[in-house]
Each structure stands twice: as C-alpha cells, then as structure tokens.
C-alpha cells in the first residue's frame, strides 16, 4: 500500500506540472531517434550480510552474468514528451564445487514516458513513469528476476555546471521509486553521474548507482542474486568515452560495489554507445 501511494503522488506531480517553453537538449525532438546498445559483465564470489560482514560463497561459489540490452528514446510529437524503452537479455551462471547452473532469458521489458517539466538556468527538470513487464518464465535457475509487473516514477535533473565550463561538462541526478505488484519489493533508486570532456572528443564519465530495496522476504540466495528482494547496494563506475561525431559516442568502463547489505559484492565492466538518428 505504501508503494502504491508514493507512486500515485509522484504521478500527480508529473501530470500537474506545466512544461517549460525552452528546448530541452536531453529530450529527442520531432524527427529525432536515439539508440543506445549496452553490454555489462558482472561477477560476485562473496556477499555482505545485514551487519556488513563479508562472507564468501560456499564451496568456491561464483555468480556471473552478461547483460546485453538495447535502449531507445523518441518524441511523442515533440521534445516535451518522449517515449522510451529497454529490451534486456540475461546470461546467468552460478557454479561451485558441486554444481554448474546456467540460464539464458529475457529480463523485464521497460516502457515509459519522460516529460520535460521546466528549465532551471543551466539545468532541465524532467519526470518519467515506467512500466516493467516480465517476459521470462523463471523455470530455470539462476532466475532472471522477481517475475512481477513493476512501476516506477522518477524525477531527473540534467544539465551542466558553468563554473566548469559552458560545454565541457554535464551531469545527471535521478531519484525514483519502483514498486513490484502485488505486494513488494519497494525500491528507492538514486543515480548520479558527472561527465568531463577533454582533448576535444574524449569524455571521462563517473557514475554512482544506488538501490535500497525493502521486502517482507529477507532471505539471501547466493546462487540466485537477482531474486534477492530485501537489500541495499551502491555501485560506482568509471568510464572513458569518445565522441566520434555529435551523433555517435562510444563508452567503456569498470564498476564495483562500494556498499552492500544483504547483497552480493559485484564488479565487472560495461560497454555502451549513444547513437542519435535524425
């Protein structure tokens, strides 16, 4: 009930806000289309319990996955409202001295609308509402996810800091509440990133990704990490990108968890591209 109420209040805010008149460079405008293919590789051989103590997986256990996905964004008439979505695929594996389990399946198909709310000097305020549709069966371990329909409301602030330069930096700050029906988990999700351009076309991009998830089911599954529903995690990533043209950029980087409670201690790499079609 709490998750539903929070989502409802944020939805009222999104629908009631008046969009500003200024063009928003973070939104796709009429005739524009954005594609972003993404690939990450993740592994974990230990976890932290609720007290923060590190515990190795039993029997030399190791959880790993590869996650390719495709993100898109396009305008609904113009830049004020964008339709966006993500199509994910998971290659999950858990192995130890006694077993070797593999599972390949789709994840939650994401589909949402992102709204330009207003411009605040060098920043733009946006809001979004996203639906998550499980397109997998969870009939083979390691499972892909909760196998539940989800909704998320999110507020975003995108822009740049003038004191760092008018065009050589950019930042993103996002806060979202995600809820999986019919009862849980309820998740607070926070994302922050800062990009610095240097040497003409190079970009250094730092990221922090935080998930604080609450559920009545507090069990930890070392061979089924994507099924754990009551946990806290903060992940840090550092990426290096190259902007070939204003419409094509390629990034690659490393990530590692820097805070965990009742969750696997993960690390890995990611590669993604930003492609703008006009």
Image (spheres, grey):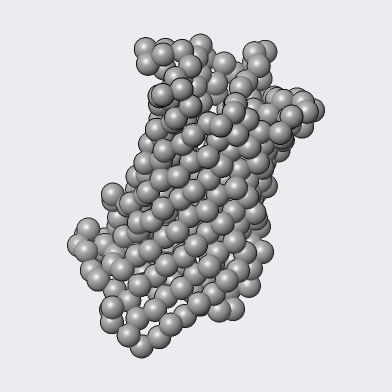
Q: Is residue 117 above or below residue 57?
A: above
Query: Residue at horizontal 59%, vertical 61%?
Result: 89
In the picture provided, is 109 more to the left or to the right than 262? right
Q: Is residue 82 visible?
A: no
Q: Is residue 225 above or below residue 124?
A: below
Q: How many labels were placed on the picture?
A: 0
The x and y percentages for residue 171 are 45, 27
Q: Is residue 227 above or below residue 114?
A: below
In the picture provided, is 154 more to the left or to the right than 12? left
The x and y percentages for residue 81 are 70, 29
* Residue closer to the observer: 173 or 72: 72
Query: Residue at horizontal 52%, vertical 53%?
Result: 39
The x and y percentages for residue 190 are 43, 40
Q: In the rendered view of the protein, which quadrant contains the C terminus?
A: top right
Quarter assignment of residue 17: top right
Query: Residue at horizontal 47%, vertical 80%?
Result: 101
Q: Residue furthest bottom?
A: 98
Quarter assignment of residue 163: top left
The x and y percentages for residue 37 are 60, 47
In the picture provided, is 103 more to the left or to the right than 204? right
Query: Residue at horizontal 62%, vertical 64%?
Result: 106
Q: Is residue 29 visible?
A: yes
Q: Is residue 49 above or below residue 155?
A: below
């Amino acid at each position: 009930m709490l998750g539903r109420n929070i989502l409802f209040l944020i939805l009222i805010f999104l629908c009631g806000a008046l969009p500003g008149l200024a063009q928003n460079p973070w939104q796709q405008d009429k005739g524009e289309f954005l594609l972003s293919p993404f690939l990450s590789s993740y592994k974990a051989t230990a976890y932290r319990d609720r007290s923060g103590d590190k515990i190795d997986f039993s029997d030399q256990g190791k959880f790993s996955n590869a996650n390719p996905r495709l993100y898109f964004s396009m305008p609904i008439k113009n830049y004020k409202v964008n339709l966006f979505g993500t199509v994910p695929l998971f290659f999950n594996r858990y192995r130890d001295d006694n077993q070797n389990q593999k599972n390949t399946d789709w994840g939650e198909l994401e589909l949402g609308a992102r709204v330009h709310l207003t411009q605040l000097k060098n920043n733009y305020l946006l809001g979004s509402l996203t639906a998550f549709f499980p397109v997998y069966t969870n009939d083979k371990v390691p499972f892909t996810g909760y196998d539940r329909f989800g909704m998320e409301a999110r507020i975003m602030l995108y822009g740049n800091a003038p004191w760092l330069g008018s065009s050589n930096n950019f930042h993103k700050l996002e806060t979202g509440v995600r809820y999986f029906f019919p009862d849980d988990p309820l998740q607070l999700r926070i994302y922050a990133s800062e990009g610095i351009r240097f040497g003409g076309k190079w970009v250094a991009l730092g990221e922090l990704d935080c998930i604080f998830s609450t559920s009545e089911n507090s069990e930890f599954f070392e061979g089924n990490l994507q099924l754990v529903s009551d946990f806290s995690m903060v992940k840090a990533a550092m990426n290096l990108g190259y902007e070939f043209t204003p419409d094509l950029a390629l990034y690659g980087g490393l990530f590692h968890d820097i805070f965990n409670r009742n969750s696997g201690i993960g690390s890995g790499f990611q590669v993604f591209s930003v492609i703008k079609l006009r």
